[in-house]
Amino acid sequence: MSMDRPYIQTISVDRILHRTFPEDTPNDQLVWHRDRADRWITIVESNGWQLQLENELPIILEAGTIHYIQKDRFHRVIKGNGPLKVSIKEK
């Protein structure tokens, strides 16, 4: 985990981002932010982690679900138990 990012990331040959947010990720690193591209987020592993989009209530992230986040839309993840593992495909 780097000092400026709360996750560990690898990129597959098909340009899919694979991110793991460790169980010990500090809450203050899970900040509101915007992405530079549209993204489809596939939840690989989650136990109580949540996604909150601006002006919406948080939703529980469940393994196997896919969430679309539009470019420049503010959002954040809220810590659960254990790690959060996601795969991200950008437009």
Image (spheres, helix red, strand yellow):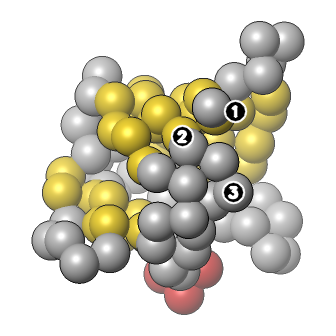
The image quarter containing residue 65 is: top left
Tell me the SS state at disc 2. Answer: strand
Label located before the other in sequence (3 or 1): 1
Calculate the distance from the C-alpha at mark 1 to the C-alpha at mark 2. 10 Å
Q: Name the residue that disc number 1 marks.
A: 17
Identity of the residue drawn at 27% across and 45% down:
61
Which residue is label 2 attached to?
A: 39
Disc 3 residue type (three-letter): Arg
Label 1 sits on a secondary structure element that is strand
How packed mark 1 is, by other alpha carbons closer than 10 Å (few <14, some 14-19, many 20 or more), is some
Decide: marks 1, 2 in contact (CB < 8 A)?
A: no
Q: Is residue 43 above or below residue 72?
A: above
- Residue shown at the point (32%, 59%) measured from the top left: 51
Pick the quarter of the image with the C terminus.
top right
Could you tell me how far apart the alpha carbons at marks 3 and 2 are, in whole angstroms? Answer: 9 Å
Residue situated in front as seen by the camera: 36 or 76:
36
Q: Which mark is in front, 1 or 2?
A: 2
Q: Is residue 26 visible?
A: no
Say what amino acid the circle numbered 2 marks: Arg
Q: Which residue is mark 3?
A: 36
Which amino acid, by three-letter code, is at mark 1?
A: Leu
In front here: 27 or 23?
Answer: 27
How crowded is the residue under tag 2: few (<14 C-alpha within 10 Å), some, or many (20+)? Answer: some
Query: Depth-wise, is mark 3 or mark 1 nearer the camera?
Result: 3
Q: Nearer the viewer, residue 91 or 87?
A: 91
When the figure is inspected, residue 35 is found, relative to residue 37, above or below; the finding is below
